[in-house]
Image (cartoon, helix red, strand yellow):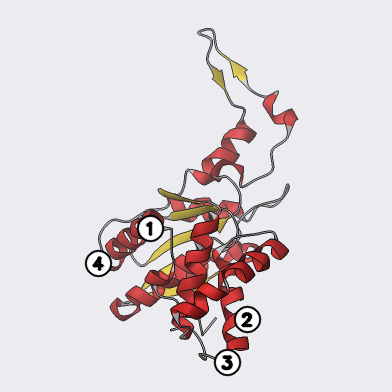
Amino acid sequence: MRRVAHIAPEDLQHIDEQRSAILRNTEQFVRGLPANNVLLTGARGTGKSSLIRACLARFHAQGLRLIEVDKNDLADLPDIVARVAARPERFVVFCDDLSFEEGESSYKALKAHSTAPSPRRARTCSSTPLEPRHLMPEYMRENLDAKYQDDGEIHPGETVEEKISLSERFGLWLSFYPFRQDDYLDIVAHWLGSFGAAPAQIEAVRTEALQFALQRGSRSGRVALQFARDCAGRLGIGGSPR
């Protein structure tokens, strides 16, 4: 992917803690300091993948680059890392909507990369709508493999351990949650303002913005931007947000 949609970290509203954490981790990486692989989990449309692209916008001038890898191509991850190892830039390898079905083995490449001696030039970031420990399907039969010790402790079977260990390869977990109504309206106002809407125009479309979200069954940041685009176009203002 040669062109990535530009978005500034400040454009991502009401995820302040997540934004601060990933910017700090990314800055450490860009400066050549120790940094973790990152797993972003939670509701769709709340800014997970946008936050990764915002890091690119913030640190591009310092040499940060983004490589987006489809889940089905994770087997190529070792080759990708090897190809960029000698380059001067720092690379974030990003896999969006990460999850695995029964029988898939591409997750093993991701685990191997995460446990290898830390490559100085590449870090892995992945997003998923699932809970961190649920990246792979779970079945009742797997619980039958649990071992009971004499002291009363329960130890999961090998299959369960394998599934849990994947999420533990990521040193930084960031969780994202559905927005409240007021948060959603704040995000709408932010994007409409970036299109050039006046405060009175923004106030006049609050009810319409809520109806738009209701039709889509989601008050997410993505839906807020979609409404702002539609509304700005109808108002005849702006070309694209900054």
Taking 75 as reference, is 53 above or below it? below
Callout 4 secondary element = loop
Number of residues whose C-alpha sits closer than 10 Å to that of mark 3, classed few (under 14), some (14–19) or many (20 or more): few
Residue placed under numbered mark 1 in the picture:
16
Residue placed under numbered mark 4 in the picture:
31
x and y percentages locating residue 174 in the rendered image: 45, 51
Front residue of this view, candidates 30 and 84: 30
**Which residue sits at x=39%, y=70%?**
9
Residue 22 location, quadrant: bottom left
Front residue of this view, candidates 3 and 51: 51
The CA distance from mark 4 to mark 1 is 22 Å
What amino acid type is highlighted by mark number 1?
Asp
What amino acid type is highlighted by mark number 3?
Gly
What amino acid type is highlighted by mark number 4?
Arg
What amino acid type is highlighted by mark number 2?
Asp
Q: Nearer the viewer, mark 2 or mark 1?
A: 2
**Which residue sits at x=51%, y=73%?**
203
x and y percentages locating residue 188 in the rendered image: 52, 70
Q: Nearer the viewer, mark 2 or mark 4?
A: 2
The answer to which of marks 2 and 4 sits earlier in the sequence is 4
- What numbered label is drawn on residue 230? 2
Q: Are marks 2 and 4 in contact (CB under 8 Å)?
A: no
